[in-house]
Image (cartoon, grey):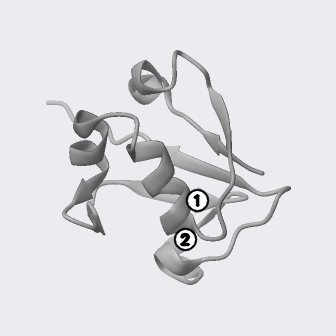
């Protein structure tokens, strides 16, 4: 099972867990499984089925945009990190 590293801003959707183990073959599958937990989480991560521009996802520390995007394959030992976007003024 791959591990999703959940940022503190999204832990309300993971029962306050910082790490979740999910069975998935790609980044898209892993994020879809995570987003099933809440419609609010779904809306935060996705516009329809497309990952929002401000959501950064990494596989083992490498931005998936530099890999195969949402179709990046993941295996049991992989870590998928969702990087929380921060805005302010």
x and y percentages locating residue 7 in the rendered image: 50, 32
Identify the residue under disc 2.
64
Res 56 → quadrant: bottom left
Quarter of the rendering occupied by the C terminus: top left
Residue 83: percent from the left, percent from the top? 47, 45
Left or right of 87? Residue 86 is right
Secondary-structure class at tag 2: helix
Separation of disc 1 and disc 2 at Cα? 5 Å
Indicate whether 32 appears above or below 72: above
- What is the number of the mark on residue 44? none
The disc at residue 58 is: 1
Residue drawn at the location 31% of the way across and 50% of the way down: 45
Tag 1–tag 2 contact (CB < 8 Å): yes
Q: Horizontal and vertical percent for residue 6?
A: 55, 34
Q: Residue furthest bottom?
A: 68
Classify 53 as above or below 68: above
The earlier-in-sequence mark between 1 and 2 is 1
> Hey, which quadrant is residue 38 in on the image?
top left
x, y percent for residue 11: 47, 23
**Identity of the residue drawn at 19% across and 31% down:** 88
Taking the image as shown, residue 10 lies to the left or right of residue 4, namely left
Judge whether 78 appears above or below 88 on screen: below
Q: Residue at the left extreme?
A: 89
Q: In the image as oriented, which residue stretches furthest toward the right?
A: 77
């Amino acid at each position: 099972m791959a591990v999703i590293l959940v940022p503190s801003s999204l832990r309300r959707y993971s029962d306050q867990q910082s790490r979740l183990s999910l069975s998935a073959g790609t980044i898209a599958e892993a994020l879809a499984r995570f987003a099933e937990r809440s419609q609010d989480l779904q809306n935060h991560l996705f516009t329809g089925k497309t990952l929002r521009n401000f959501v950064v996802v990494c596989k083992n520390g490498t931005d998936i945009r530099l890999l195969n995007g949402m179709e990046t394959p993941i295996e049991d030992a992989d870590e998928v990190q969702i990087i929380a976007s921060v805005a302010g003024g």
